[in-house]
Image (cartoon, rainbow, N blue to C red):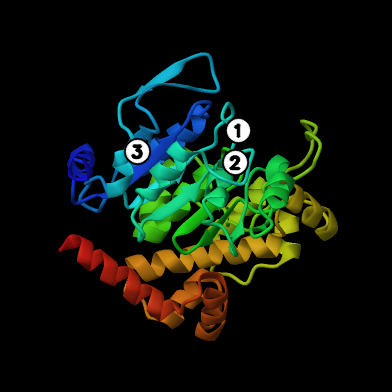
């Protein structure tokens, strides 16, 4: 029986040269979350235009799966697919709201047991409850929808719940907050797998922000602005065109004809982080692109990205990514060479 299941699972993924992504859905699934995974991973392409991922959907028992809307979706793949997955995504379920007890149902536990030990597993929204019940989040930092964060913390005190971020990345276990933050999580995984260029192209194709740091606030309490209220959008666009310059808050505020104090407050209201934090994120992103796409020396990359010196670039790069710019370039290009071979 085990061999039969394995053979069937292998047949589900028809492109052995691609990264295999399995989406495990349950009754009450959010259609948007399923669409996010297929749409974003499905758009990722190599330099030669070849798809980089193969995404399949499976469920605990093949057949019609109820959604959070007024229709069902037929899913003909069962949990055996998980045995051959490189990445497993567990979206939320509203009908089967994540385990009310601290243990998984036997079918769900058996399904998760099929996942290879070296596979990457991620959750969207309250899918984090499944990972927590499986013990995958013990001792790890994790997040979920801000409305469910206290519930997750109370049921699973072993988990370090952070309700104030878009997503968390702890090696091969990742979690994201409510629904749309699944976009940020998938883009983050694509960026981690294939670099900023591929991820940014996917973002452009989906017409979404190319990069929101996981540490950005997932929920900013603010009133809907009046139509006449000024925005910081023009200043942000100008800053992106001038990252190589030593930009100041005073300059950015002047672009919007605001005082520094007003600009600072409005920027945080709109983006969720401070203008200086945002600038650092954009500069790191620019440095990543240059390290991936060019042969510029590190000190030139530092200048072009607006860090000024190689030492400043190394400090910020290490703090944000945990590696030096040189190590990042070597690792990224080494992985590309392996994929090309």
Percent x, y for residue 68?
55, 23
As measured in the structure, the alpha-carbon distance from the residue carrying label 1 to the one carrying label 3 is 19 Å
Label 2 SS? helix
Label 3 SS? helix
Residue contact at pointers 1 and 3, CB within 8 angstroms:
no
Image: 235 above or below 145: below
As drawn, is 263 to the left or to the right of 232? right
Label 1 SS? loop
Q: Residue furthest left?
A: 341
As measured in the structure, the alpha-carbon distance from the residue carrying label 2 to the one carrying label 1 is 8 Å
Residue found at x 76% / y 64%: 250
Numbered badge on residue 126: 2
Image: 31 above or below 150: above
Residue contact at pointers 2 and 1, CB within 8 angstroms:
yes
Percent x, y for residue 288?
44, 67
Could you tell which of marks 2 and 3 lies nearer the N-terminus? 3
Residue behind mark 3: 79
Quadrant of the snapshot with the C terminus = bottom left
């Amino acid at each position: 029986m085990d061999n039969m299941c394995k053979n069937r699972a292998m047949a589900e993924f028809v492109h052995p040269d691609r990264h295999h992504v399995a989406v495990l859905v349950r009754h009450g699934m959010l259609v948007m979350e399923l669409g996010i995974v297929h749409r974003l991973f499905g758009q990722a392409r190599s330099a030669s235009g070849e798809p980089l991922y193969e995404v399949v959907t499976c469920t605990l028992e093949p057949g019609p799966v109820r959604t959070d809307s007024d229709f069902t979706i037929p899913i003909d793949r069962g949990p055996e697919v998980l045995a051959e997955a490189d990445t497993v995504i567990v979206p939320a379920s509203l009908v089967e709201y994540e385990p009310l007890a601290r243990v998984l149902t036997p079918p769900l536990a058996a399904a998760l047991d099929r996942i290879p030990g070296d596979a990457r597993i991620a959750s969207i929204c309250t899918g984090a409850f499944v990972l927590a019940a499986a013990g995958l989040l013990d001792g790890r930092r994790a997040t979920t929808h801000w409305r469910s964060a206290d519930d997750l913390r109370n049921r699973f005190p072993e988990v370090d719940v952070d309700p104030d971020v878009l997503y968390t990345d702890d090696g091969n276990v990742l979690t994201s907050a409510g629904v749309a933050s699944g976009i940020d999580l998938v883009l983050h995984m694509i960026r981690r797998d294939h670099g900023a260029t591929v991820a940014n192209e996917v973002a452009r194709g989906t017409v979404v922000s190319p990069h929101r740091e996981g540490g950005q606030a997932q929920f900013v309490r603010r009133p809907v602005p009046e139509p006449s209220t000024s925005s910081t959008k023009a200043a942000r666009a100008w800053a992106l065109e001038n990252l190589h310059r030593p930009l100041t808050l005073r300059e950015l505020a002047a672009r919007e004809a605001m005082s520094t104090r007003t600009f600072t407050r409005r920027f945080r209201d709109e983006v969720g982080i401070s203008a200086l934090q945002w600038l650092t994120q954009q500069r790191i992103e620019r440095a990543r692109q240059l390290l991936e796409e060019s042969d510029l020396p590190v000190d030139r990359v530092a200048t072009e990205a607006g860090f000024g010196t190689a030492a400043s670039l190394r400090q910020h790069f290490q703090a944000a990514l945990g590696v030096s710019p040189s190590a990042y370039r070597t690792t990224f290009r080494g992985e590309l060479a392996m994929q090309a071979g």
